[in-house]
Image (cartoon, rainbow, N blue to C red):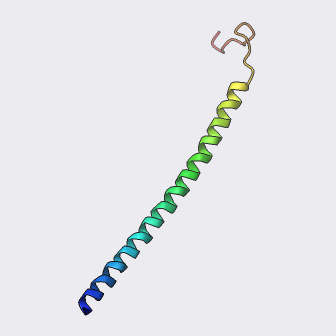
Amino acid sequence: MDTRITDLEIRLTHQESTLDELNDTIIHQQRDIDKLQREIISLTDQIRSLQQAPAAPPGEETPPPHY
């Protein structure tokens, strides 16, 4: 009986350790996801600002320096 209790305590300790590791992993992954979402928003804003910039018609553009 005593060994069964000891075995159960050992299993419980390992399970708690595993849960702690999994929790840490989830926390790190969520931080990475949050960072990537901020980067996507920033890149989307940059693309939108480039698309909204008025482009001169081809006849009004200055020729390149080699002309």
Residue in front for this viewpoint, 20 or 50: 20
Q: Residue furthest bottom?
A: 2
Q: Residue at x 75, y 21 (%)?
A: 54
Picture quarter containing residue 46? top right
Residue 5, percent across and down?
30, 88
Residue in front for this viewpoint, 57 or 20: 20
Q: Is residue 37 above or below residue 13?
A: above
Q: Residue at x 65, y 41 (%)?
A: 42
Residue 61, percent across and down?
72, 12
| Total marks in image | 0
Q: Is residue 57 above or below residue 34?
A: above
Residue in front for this viewpoint, 21 or 9: 9
Picture quarter containing residue 52? top right
Residue 26, percent across and down?
48, 60
Residue 7 lies left or right of residue 60; in this view the side is: left
Q: The N terminus lies in which quarter of the figure?
A: bottom left
Q: Is residue 31 above or below residue 55?
A: below
Q: The C terminus lies in which quarter of the figure?
A: top right
Q: Residue furthest front?
A: 1
Residue 14, percent across and down?
34, 76
Q: Residue at x 63, y 13 (%)?
A: 66
Residue 7 lies left or right of residue 43; in this view the side is: left
